[in-house]
Amino acid sequence: MCLRNLLRRRLRTSLCILGITLATIFIVTIGATTSRYTSVIREMNIFFSGDIVVVAQGSIVVQAFPISGGNLPEDTIDEMKEIEGVRTAVPMLVFFGYKLEGVIQPVPANISIGIPPESWAILVGSTPLKPDGRWPSANSSAKEVVVGPSLADQYNLAVSSTIRIQNNDLMVVGILDTPSAILTRAIIIPLRVAQHVYLPTHPSWINMIVVEPEDESMEKEVAENIETNIGGVEALTADERNEIIAPLLSDIEMWNLGIRGMLFFLSMILVTTVAVMNISERRRDFATLGAIGAPRSFIFRLVITETTLIGLFGGLLGILVGTVATLLLASLYTNIPLTLFFQSPFDIVSPVFMAEVLTSTVVVSCAAGLVPAVNAMRANISEVLRSEY
Amino acid sequence: MIVKAVELTRIYRLGSSHITAVDKVNLQVDEANLVSIIGPSGSGKTTLLHLIGLNDTPTSGKILFNGDDTSFLSESERRKTRLQRMGFIFQTFNLLPTLTALENVELPMALAKFSQKEQMGKTVNLLETVGLAERLQHRPKQLSAGEMQRVAIARALANNPSLILADEPTGELDSKAGCEIINLLSELCKNQNIAVVLATHDERMAEVSDVTYRICDGVITLE
């Protein structure tokens, strides 16, 4: 009955559903994209938690990695090892691939990480490689790399494939088996090779050092010691790295929530308007229902179900189109082919987020029907039946 | 006695003026009686019908339904009484436009929580009784005025009411269809032991009615 009532006013219902759909598309697209950004940023913090990240002073650090700033001479490591409380110090050279085919990308298409072969574990933990793969040999000058699965899929790389970076041919010896957003787009290279490839004129420079304190509780103290004893560096504890990024994450989330709230509010006004119009046109129907003895709760449920159905259809359609739009956007910003995103769309728009948006849309539509439903329920039967002849 | 109105008065307040639509009406409706309330437009017929049908509350006076004073019924009890013991027929039929004839008749039974099987069987019987066995799946806009009124009558009969209230049931019909509806209501009244109260300005109703009241300016007189 509710469906038929909606279909009876096909144009109005369709326009209302379209409105909800558009709002939901925006919510899904903006929400999923920003969630992806923030989750990638948060994921960065998983790396080197409990360790100190040392970078050149003035570098911009997003959680665990410097995204811009100066380099450090590699012999800083020797000074570092002398500092009290330092257990190990691992030099690294990290480059975000913002430039692709000569064009600057808004989102890095890949991340190259140069790390001494004996220290892979500090970066990848126990992440396995896909079958037939192996880690680059201990011979630190071997031009061998391990790549993330997304890069491998995109460029059809397999073990023994060759990739060309800055006019250097590097052989893929392993492909990571990981869902990690960072590692999936990573190129892990022996440090010496990375220095040769990315800094050919300064082959003994690095841009970050990961310091493991002897005792995790000494993290802050060790970081202070490093900054005191070595000039021109910043030693950031996990807490400090979080503090740097916290305002940005909080801003992103606030904007995301604000936009989402505004769109839900607009959707609610739209549904309420349409429901009020529908109800004012059907006053006689409701009065008739009352006259034949329909309980007020039946009339209330009827209106609420209609508005909820509008929300449900609009929400479902919006989530479907919004997911496609999000994948398109992600493909556009990262230059990763759309087909790769379609292989695992739930990595970009999570089912939990979809369920959350659908629930919100349905709840908002349901709430939007409350006032019209109460109006319909309270209609004075005799007055309406007399006046509507 | 099905219904008894005692000193029933309904006054509408429009700004500072008061309009007495029904003025100290006393009437009685007995089982299987066809009672006509005849009067011109604006005489208070519809208001009286809505008061009897518990769709409206009187300013003063009371309605006894099956001997019980309805003044103390809550809104939900009034709705329940209408659903289970009364049927309504309107001048403009008031069928729900999105439902078929079958569904319109099923609706009161569904509201009264009859089983799906009972609803279906009874609905088909009722529509056969009013001569619409071939029109079950038609929507109101696919029916003629006479057919729509027949569906409305079938709907009014759905929950085996003891009282049917009909407000100008022939008002929108041509004279042939009007006669058919009058005859149908008269037959139902006698065959199914249902009391029918008709508000009309159609003088032909006096001929088939058991009791005829005339109403003018809210004041009723027994003919």
Image (cartoon, coloured by chain):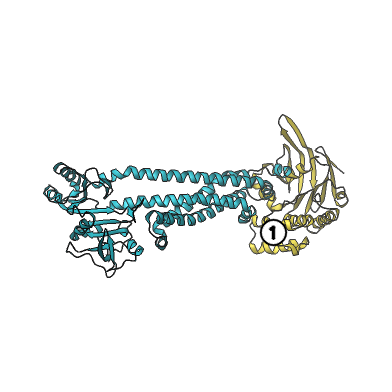
Amino acid at circle 1: Thr
Please state, as top left, top right, bottom left or bottom right, where the C terminus of chain B lies in the image: top right
Give the letter of the cyan chain: A
Q: How many marks?
A: 1
Give the residue at x 41% y 43%: A255
Query: In the figure, A328 relative to B223: above or below?
Result: below
Hue used for the chain lettered B: yellow
Confirm whether residue B30 shows in the render.
no
Confirm whether residue B37 shows in the render.
yes
Q: Nearer the viewer, residue A92 or A264?
A: A92
Q: Nearer the viewer, residue A326 or A190?
A: A190
Q: Position of residue A322 (x, y in %)?
A: 47, 54
Left or right of B66 on screen, residue A149: left
Q: Position of residue B211 (x, y in %)?
A: 84, 48
Q: Position of residue B2 (x, y in %)?
A: 76, 49
Q: Mark 1 falls within which chain?
A: B
Left or right of A71 on screen, residue A357: right
